[in-house]
Structure formats: C-alpha cells, structure tokens
Amino acid sequence: MESRELRYFVAVAEELHFGRAAERLGMAQPPLSRAVAQLERRLGTALLERSSRSVSLTDAGAVLLREGRTALDALEAAEHRTRRAAPADAPPGIALATKAGASDELLAKLLDAYAADPRAVPVDVVLCGPGQQGRLLRTGRVDVALLHPPIDDVEGLDVEELRTEGQVVLLPAGHPLSTRGELRLADVADLPGLPAPRWPSPDGAYADGPGPEVHDHAQLLQLVSLGRTSVVVPDVVRAQLRGGVVAVPVTDAPQVTTVIAWPPRSRSLDVARLVETALRL
Amino acid sequence: MESRELRYFVAVAEELHFGRAAERLGMAQPPLSRAVAQLERRLGTALLERSSRSVSLTDAGAVLLREGRTALDALEAAEHRTRRAAPADAPPGIALATKAGASDELLAKLLDAYAADPRAVPVDVVLCGPGQQGRLLRTGRVDVALLHPPIDDVEGLDVEELRTEGQVVLLPAGHPLSTRGELRLADVADLPGLPAPRWPSPDGAYADGPGPEVHDHAQLLQLVSLGRTSVVVPDVVRAQLRGGVVAVPVTDAPQVTTVIAWPPRSRSLDVARLVETALRL
DNA sequence: CACCGGCGATACCGCAGGGGTATGGGTCCC
DNA sequence: GGGACCCATACCCCTGCGGTATCGCCGGTG
C-alpha cells in the first residue's frame, strides 16, 4: 500500500465527504474518488458506503482509519526524527512540547532541576495549542511532552505521572455561584449567559456554538472576567488568576493528571535523564 | 515522505549496496540511486556515505533506517489488519504465530484451555520459521504470537510472560561431554567437529560458515544424532528427544522465557481473552 | 411533479515523474 | 596499467496521477 493512497483515504474517512476531503488535500474531487476506489480494489474490500447523499465507513474502513492514522504518524515521525538527527540542524538537544500557559511552574521547576545536571543538553520548549502535544510527539517533531490525561490521549506513548489535581470552575467575580465553597459539574453546565468557550480544533477551525473563540489562556481569563464565558480547568491555574475571576472547586470533575510522555522505544539517553529528573521533583 | 522512497532507502540501508538492493526491489540500479538521492534532497540530509567502493550509513541514515522500518511495518500492518477485517475473509477469529516445533505442549494446553471458554473464537495457528513471529505480529498478519526473548525481539510489543526455563546443549550420544551432568557455554562453544548449525535469515538466505544448513527441528535433531552439529536450545526440547541425542544443561546460558505477545493498542476482546487464558495456565 | 442543487462516478486528456538502457568516472586489486 | 566493481549521470519512454467536463442519482422544494 502506498502512503499517498492512505493519506487520501484517511482524509475522506475523516471528512466523510469527497469534496471537502479533496479541498483539504489541495486536489480535485475526481482523482480522489478514483484513488480511493483503487485502494479498495487493491485491498479487495469496500472501505466506504456511498449513497450519493452521504458517505460512511464500513467495518474494514474503520480499521483502516485507525491503523492508517498511526502508520501515517509513524511515517511522519520517521521523517522528523531523521531531520532532527541531521548534522545541519544544530544538534538540538531535546524538544519538549507543552500546552501554552499550562504547567508553568512545574515546567520551570523541571527545567531548573534538569539544567543542574552536568550532563544536561539544551531543551527546546515548544508551546502549542491544547491537545497538540500528543500529535507533535507522535509525529516526531518533539522528543517529550507534558500531557494531561484524560483530556489528552496518551495511547501509544510511554508515560510517567508527575502530579494529580482536581479541577476548578472559573467564574466572573460577582457571579451568583462565585461565593460557593464548592460546586458540582451539573451546577456549572450551561450557565445562562456564560456559554462554553470554543477552542480551535487541530485543523485550526472552530466548531459552531454560542461561546467565544479563544486560543490562549490570557484571552480565556479575560473573557471570564468580562462575564462572557466560564470554564472548568485544572487547579493550578488558580496561581495565575487576576482580579475579576474567581475559581471554585468542582468536586466531581475528573482528576487531571500531569504526565511526562515520550515515544515508545525512544533510545535517547537525554530524554531518559530528563524524565528521571522530572520524577525526582 | 512517500512510502516508496522509504522502502527504497531501507533496502539500500540494509544491503549497503545499491546493486543488490535494486535486485531485491526488482528494479534497475540507476533509478534506485536517483530515488535515494532525491529522498536525501527532500530531507535536506545525507543518509548514506558513498565511497565508490562501499556504502555506509550516516547518523541520520541510521535513525531513518530504524524509524523507517517501524513506519513501513505500521503501513503493512494497516493493510493486513484491514484485509482481515474484511467481511469477505471468513470472519477469522484469531491468528496466532509460533515457531514451528517450539512450545508444543504449552501451545496445546493453551488452545485446549481457550477452547473451553464459551466465548472462544476459532484460532488459526500459523507456524513459522524462527524469528519470524515478531515480524508477522508487527505487520498485522497475525494477532498474537508466542515469542522467546531474549532470542526474539519484543520491542514495541505488549507482552505477558508465560514460562521461564534454562537451556541445554544437544550433543550426539557418545560425545565425550555427553556424560557430564552440566556444562558451561565456554565448554560447548566451537566444539571440534560440531560446528554450529546455520538457520535461514529472514530473506531465506544462509550465512556462510562450516555448519550444516537446517530449517526445522526434526532436521536439527537428526544432524545432532549424526554427529554433524551441536546446539544450545531451551530445556523443553528434551521432551522431543529421540535416541542418539543427549541433552546436558548449560548453567550459564541465558534463561529463555516464553511470552505471549500482541500488538500495542490492540483492541480485540478475543485476543484479550486468549491472553487471559494463557496467564491462567 | 418538475426542477434544482448537491454529490460521487465516469470519460477523457495532458504531462510530470518514475523506470529503463547506455555510459561515465572513481577506486581497488592483480 | 588493465580490468572488475560500483555508484552517478544522461537520455528516453511510458505509466499513471491529476485536471476539466460531464453524467447519474437522489432529496428537498415550490
């Protein structure tokens, strides 16, 4: 199977729409239809059910979507890791991904502690949007990442747990609920006038909905203080709060753990030392 | 990166010879040279050192060889697992790979115990040459395998240990050492007149050497009894011994474990039940 | 019920690029 | 120094990928 065919199929399977998939791939729709049909012929299996109004996955198609994504990730990882091993790239030490604005003090402590190790190499910190760290890690663009399961998917990654904490809801100061000592998820779902914020999805698009579009923490805090939204976030962000925003613990929100993750079968001694340092914190 | 280019590079990196690699790929040498050069250009890195007499890997090339193999395996796995999910293929239950002739009684016990489970599905047993099980598993041709680390590589597989045992050396009856109660590796290395047997490598070729070529256990036992070779094997094969062959424990040979292995992130309930059954043995 | 709009498949064409053969140029060995 | 070996280059051909135009099907609509 050729990676090109697989990329095409995955695009169609994700969009469930040949036209949009073709657009995403930067090509016209007919060759895409043909390529997918050819892949089905080669595999000897239908992957998609077409009904001139809609497209859906067959069982085999669902398998190929899942397996194909990991295969394409592996391909991309091979490419990026090779690039990073190239002598031209200044021998870069370690690249670490973390969600912008999250785990700030933990990260600072980690970097300080690691820098104290005489064998430490430079650490390139890559700040990325929420949920992007896993992808960066799986596709070889970084060597290690800080993730927050169960929010982030850690399937297929090697992981060590660093910290576990509860979650709080951020409310505008003066909101009726803001004086309560604790709340439950049901209390803070669909608060009138405070629709949930919308984050960009991996492709940069925003889902439809009433909530404001946000792309970083500062913006989020400002929108909360302006009374435009409220949101449930891990406990640590309390440290970054400013006036106008109140945090109330949400007792039944899932515990959020911070983990340090790296690709399975990593052979990098440097990564191993960084992880070791993190575990000693 | 295209999978075609990667396949070409891996072939060259494994052969360290453009001519042989081209032959293996069923193509002429010049387009292969070009394709690899183009890949290097695209990656912006030299992958191979060419010195008109020999080819060797750069550091980046070594990374790409390792990562590329797993990416190509993942691609192949996506293909095979999709095929096996196809409705056309008689809904196949589980495919299990094991080395022909090894773990016979363990396998029999496992299959019996599993068949007793009312939720059991058919198990297709794939007998393969030594060292092939891992490859079958990684490329999605089977769902589960019995392996023998450290002989077999289990990197990147999920594994449960089933049994650990010592190793014995097989000697022709009447050999001076055959009456000893135990031996050490140094005693049985390079025994005069008994060169180590040669197994086919994955591509079916045999390494050079003085020892006889073998491809299954029966043949091996016969060659030992004929006084042509001797070999260190796991303890269980004593159960299959016939006249003319004597087994003597080798006290300092590495312990061989039998493990049941499956691909990471397997979501098959059937495989999980089979593994569970195996652990209860 | 006829029309229209949306969507995937088919038909056909043009060309980029992958593969083949022939050959060059460097290196080691005798 | 001649020959064998091996990778790179030059050049050509043709496959096959992608583009445009169009068809066929279906569902919603006035």
Image (cartoon, coloured by chain):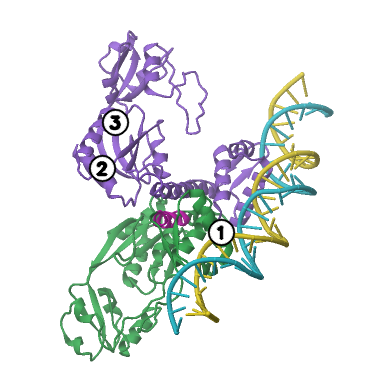
Chain colours: A purple, B green, C cyan, D yellow
Query: What residue appears at the point 25 percent right and 42 percent down from the top-left corner?
Result: A274
Mark 1, residue position: B34
> At which x and y percent is residue A251?
28, 24
Count neighbours of disc 1 (C-alpha within 10 A) and say few if under 14, some if 14 to 19, many if 20 or more.
few
Q: Quadrant of the C terminus of chain B?
A: bottom left
Q: Secondary structure at mark 1?
A: helix
Label disc, if present, on residue A255 of the rendered structure: 3
Secondary structure that dominates the magenta span = helix
Label disc, if present, on residue B184 of the rendered structure: none
Q: Amino acid at mark 2?
A: Leu
> At which x and y percent is residue B262?
38, 57
Query: What residue appears at the point 31 percent right and 66 percent down from the top-left corner?
Result: B148
Q: Amino acid at mark 3?
A: Gln
Is B69 covered by the magenta stretch? yes
Marks 1, 3: nearer the viewer: 1
The image shows residue C6, relative to residue B81, as above or below, that is above
Confirm whether residue B123 shows in the render. no
In this view, the residue in front, A205 or A270, is: A270
Distance from disc 1 to disc 3, alpha carbons, whole Å, reads 54 Å
The image shows residue B116, relative to residue A162, as above or below, that is below
Q: Secondary structure at mark 3?
A: loop
